[in-house]
Amino acid sequence: MSIALADLIDPKQIALNLRAETQTEALHEIVELLVAAGKIDHADKFLEQVRAREATSSTYAANGVAFPHARTKLVDEIVVGIGRSEAGIPWTGKGEVAHLIFLIAVPERLISDYLVVVGAIARSTKDRPLRTLLLHAENVDEFIGTLLSAPSI
């Protein structure tokens, strides 16, 4: 893998207690973290791109995990924002609820790196014990340590 997940995960880009109750609110809350971290300048444009992508096909991956993303010219590197919701965020309109949300901004030229990153996170979060640890991590450092300790990362 030419890009390491550890290099993409920043404590300032993780919200372990999302206040959001809807998908739109959750995406906005996570994007605000990315703006505050200086990773995205045009929040509204990026949110519009993410919502457009979501409208074509849900990014809900099962087991309470979603990977909303957009290929965009608004970033020069892959950017990851993470949100966790104990209550869960209704995601698809079909009853699926996301508890872990990995929001990803992808430069158009780094699609293959994006697929590697998403694949690693997706394989890791399929593991029920790991998912449980992520859902119960008491702080951001514990969350990051757990995520990065997964064998598929």
Image (cartoon, helix red, strand yellow):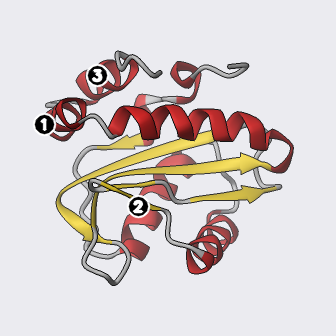
Mark identifier at residue 136: 1
Residue named by callout 3: 146
Inspect the image, locate mark 3, and give the three-letter code of the amino acid beneath it: Thr
Mark identifier at residue 89: none
State the image coordinates of residue 38 (x, y, percent, origin top left): 62, 42
> How far apart are the alpha carbons under marks 1 and 3?
10 Å
Upstream in the sequence, badge 2 or badge 3? Answer: 2
- Nearer the camera: disc 2 or disc 3: 3
Mark 2–mark 3 CB contact (< 8 Å)? no
Q: Is residue 27 above or below residue 34?
A: below
Upstream in the sequence, badge 1 or badge 3? Answer: 1
Q: Nearer the viewer, residue 21 or 37?
A: 21
Upstream in the sequence, badge 1 or badge 2? Answer: 2
Q: Residue at x 44, y 41 (%)?
A: 122
Mark identifier at residue 29: 2
State the image coordinates of residue 26 (x, y, percent, origin top left): 37, 65
Q: Is residue 134 above or below residue 28?
A: above
Inspect the image, locate mark 1, and give the three-letter code of the amino acid beneath it: His
Inspect the image, locate mark 2, and give the three-letter code of the amino acid beneath it: Glu
